[in-house]
Amino acid sequence: MTYAHLMTLANGHAGSKALLIANELGLFTAIGTGWRSAEEVASRCRANREGVRLLLNALVGLELLALRRGRYGNTPLGRQYLDGASPTAVTNLLWLLNHHWSDWTGMAAALKTGRRGWAAVTTTAAFRRRFALAMHERSHVLAPLTVAAMNVPRGAGRFLDVAGGPGSYAIALAERYPRLTGTIIDQHVSTARALIRRHHLQRRLTLRRGDLFSIDLGTGYDAAVAANILHDFNERENRTLLERIHAALRPSGKLFVVEFFLDGTLTKPAEAALFSLVMYKFTASGRSYAWRAVEGWLRRLGFGRLRRRPITAGIGLLEATKV
Ligand SMILES: C[S@@+](CC[C@H](N)C(=O)[O-])C[C@H]1O[C@@H](n2cnc3c(N)ncnc32)[C@H](O)[C@@H]1O
């Protein structure tokens, strides 16, 4: 770490926030596939002309926009991911990251006085819907890669997706294994319902709305997926949840845990350690866990044949068999 690195890190929020604010204003979508003047963009975003021009110029500086003869256009990357009209847009995911800005803002106070629990806004239907869309924008790229790394039991017929959210992992599994049928359980299911319909998987994927800790999960599943859910809870809650999943699997059934896993020092990868801190503020009791910790819980519950598989630099897949 040099002084220059330190200053880049200290000022890192400026570039991040320019991107997130532009997304909040709908600026990339307002530009779309055309080349527009600052006045046009300001008018389409219903925003102040002087301020929007400054933001546009900063975004060109960051190479998030292009400038040609006084007009602003999206880059190929922007057209693919930032223009809300693109089928691969990540506008809801950026919305969620902008929401985490409020978590960072309240972080110092929470570090002094302790956890505050879930913010009231996170329990509203509007938040849950947008959160689910954000999860899908994140997971629909990662899910096919992750599913390709899963060692699904030969001849498997039924799987359970615990806290399946928008259903991205269930959809990826159903698309890769045409004989599989799945049950997705979550407290919010309307986003998954729409996505399942879009993928014509209504006959193979069943949705059940309810609380993970009280709903009957069913029994006899060949496989279960728990993707990005352990970080919502503390150790005791996770052991309870994993015990329920263990009971729902048939003998030799497989569990696939997808998470931001930490190494034994709990410091690396830095992305997972930072995510853990955000979860301290965002959730009531969650954080990131070390591979070793989750493996210990699983062994004690009667899982064996544990296998680690890194999916990205931060995210990993832990596979376990009910022995
Ligand atoms: C981070 S998202 C992960 C969604 C999905 N598995 C994925 O990876 O895209 C966590 C999900 O857990 C659900 N969830 C959290 N606590 C829950 C509970 N007590 N009962 C049911 N669902 C819950 C949320 O609604 C959300 O969809």
Image (cartoon, grey):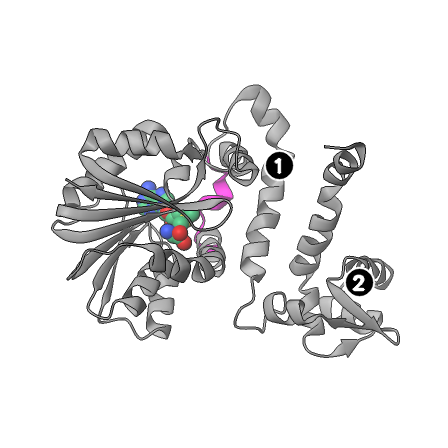
Residue density around tag 2, few if under 14, some if 14–19, many if 20 or more, within 10 Å:
some
Give the camera-side residue of 124 and 213.
213
Left or right relative to 208: residue 12: right
Amino acid, disc 2? Val
Amino acid, disc 1? Trp
Left or right relative to 73: residue 114: left
Name the image quarter holding the C terminus.
top left
Is 250 contained in the magenta span? no
Name the residue at 41% across, 43% down: 259
The image shows residue 273, relative to residue 228, as above or below, that is above
Name the residue at 33% across, 68% down: 196
The image shows residue 252, relative to residue 288, as above or below, that is below
Where does the magenta region start and end? Answer: 118-126
Is 123 contained in the magenta span? yes
Give the camera-side residue of 185 and 296.
296
Residue 286, given in percent of the width and then of the height, sits at 43, 33
Name the residue at 12% across, 49% down: 219
Name the image quarter holding the N terminus.
top right
Tell me the residue that label 2 is attached to.
60
Instruction: Tell me which numbered mark, 2 or 1, is placed earlier along the sequence.
Output: 2
Q: Residue furthest top?
A: 112
Residue density around tag 1, few if under 14, some if 14–19, many if 20 or more, within 10 Å:
some
State the predominant SS element of the stretch in magenta.
helix
